[in-house]
Amino acid sequence: MTLQFFLNLVLIACVIGILILFLRRFAETEGEQGQGQQSLEFAEIEKRAQKPAAASESSGQMPAQERAEKNFWARFPSAALGLVKSAVSFLKKSLQALLRPVWHFMLEAKDLKQGQILASKFARMLPSKAKIKNIGAHSKIRKAERLSSEGKIGDAEQVFLEVIMQHPHEYAAYEGLVKIYLQQKKYSEVIETLEYLIKHNPENDHYYAQLGNVFMIGRRYDEAIAAYERALELNVLIPARFVNAGLCRHALGDYQGAARFFKKALELEPANVQYVLMLVDVLVKMKNSEEARKHLERAAEIDPNSALIRERLMGL
């Protein structure tokens, strides 16, 4: 049973319950008023009963039961309007109380990465009353992600854009567009979208790292390095960002800067032979064969069957 189906059942039950309670209460009120009115008119009715029937008919007076029915229908529109207002207010409060534990359960049930995405998403959303409105946005985002996984890129892009039009601060939709534009190799659109996300989420290291990747693809190495360095300021525990920054330094001919980044990556993953080979490459270009040999010997201990490491050792 999906969340939306469950919410629909709750809505229907609330409306039916409120309607039954109102009609019951309204009927009781009308009954009390009708009894009071009948007791006041009882004496008048007895007097009229003593008069000839023709006089009673010619007087034009309406029977008490008919008059009570007329009063009921005269008051029904205003009573119905009050019912609608009360029902809307009750449903809002009920849904808010219901959704809070549901969202907490979702955060706990997801894995860590998805939970962090959802948590940051809800932290950026509008006040609690607006959270109910964003349920539809999350549903559309899941639909767009499904379309993208099925290869329907154009349809997925359209759904993401619809979500952004209706919910400009739903950043998960922008993240979905970034993935689509990367698949389509629309790098200018990727950069524009990421810069918008960074403007509104300046503490998100993932956005800076993605921007660095796109700049690196376009050989805009200086801008890529700046983006990677900002990402590393926010999160220093991802070695791939040090490696990418080192590759950009290497492409610019800054071998010393590249070696510094590669060494940082090796501090985080000392057993990564690929990082060792990158570092050895720049050390050789810096004519620092002795340090290069030390790193190669350590790599040979990690992977003694590597023909590439043996070849590089023989070449020093």
Image: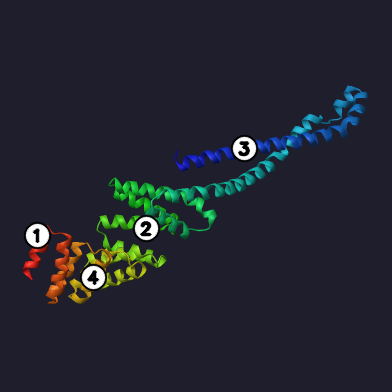
Residue with the most extreme top position: 53
Within 10 angstroms of label 4, few (less than 14), some, or many (20 or more) residues?
A: many
Disc 4 residue type (three-letter)? Lys
Which comes before the other along the chain, label 3 or label 2? 3
Which comes before the other along the chain, label 1 or label 4? 4
Of badges 1 and 2, nearer the viewer stands 1
Of badges 3 and 4, nearer the viewer stands 4
Question: What residue is shown with label 4?
Answer: 263
Disc 1 residue type (three-letter)? Ala
Image position, residue 116 (x, y; %): 41, 56
Question: What residue is shown with label 3?
Answer: 17
Depth check, front residue: 261 or 58: 261
Q: Quadrant of residue 273?
A: bottom left
Of badges 2 and 4, nearer the viewer stands 4
**Labelled pair 1, 4 in contact (Cβ < 8 Å):** no
Question: What residue is shown with label 2?
Answer: 174
Question: What residue is shown with label 1?
Answer: 307
Horizontal relation, residue 186 to residue 42: left or right: left
Secondary structure of residue under mark 1: helix
